[in-house]
Image (tube, helix red, strand yellow):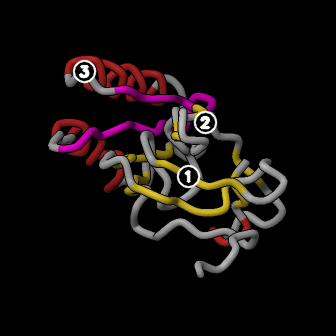
Amino acid sequence: MVDLSPFDFMNMEEQVWLQLLPDGGFKVCCIPFRAYGLTLGDIVELDSDRRNVARVQAKGGHRAFRVFFPPELREPELGEVRIRVDRLIQMDSLAAEWSGDRHVAIDVPPGREISRIRQDIQPEVESGKAFWEWADVEGFRTSRSRPRS
């Protein structure tokens, strides 16, 4: 789990999928939706209870591009935009995960570009019917992090 309190989601956590590595570390195997500074491929350390991510030990080089479509974007327009975004994700051979039908997190591997997706949703952004952000606009932190020695 990832404590989301430091990112203004009070008393909330995000579940992330981790792979146990041979050395005992953990690798992030999903695209986080709400945690900042955490992306697919990062190596993380868990807290002493081994339940919560305590810190990022090493960055995996990926970035996450997240798009949210608020309630102002209604059907059938929402469905049309979602189909366009899905098509561009597939055309660019990118991995993505949807949370419901209004929030998509797109994995951007090292050296990859997503300009087509950004350009495609720009009309919705300009009209307030979409918002986007990079997951690394803030560094990872948690109220449960232990200080580095």
Q: Nearer the viewer, mark 3 or mark 2?
A: 2
Q: Which mark is residue 44?
A: 1
Q: For the residue carrying disc 2, how many other residues have a C-alpha within 10 Å: few (<14), some (14-19), or many (20+)? A: some
Q: Which residue is mark 3?
A: 93
Indicate whether 80 appears above or below 116. above
- Check the image and name the residue furthest to the front: 23
Q: Which mark is residue 18?
A: 2
Question: Who comes first in sequence, dot 2 or dot 1?
Answer: 2
Question: Who comes first in sequence, dot 3 or dot 2?
Answer: 2
Residue 24 place in picture, x, y as percent: 61, 42
Q: Is residue 93 left or right of residue 6?
A: left
- The amino acid beneath tag 1 is Val
Q: For the residue carrying disc 3, how many other residues have a C-alpha within 10 Å: few (<14), some (14-19), or many (20+)? A: few
Q: Residue at x 31, y 24 (%)?
A: 84
Marks 2,1: beta carbons within 8 A: yes
Question: Who comes first in sequence, dot 1 or dot 3?
Answer: 1
Residue 98 sits inside the magenta stretch: yes
- The amino acid beneath tag 2 is Leu
Per the model, the C-alpha gap separating discs 3 and 2 is: 23 Å
Marks 3,2: beta carbons within 8 A: no
Say whether residue 84 is visible.
yes
Per the model, the C-alpha gap separating discs 1 and 3 is: 26 Å
Say whether residue 72 is visible.
no
Instruction: Provide the secondary structure element on which disc 3 rests.
Output: loop
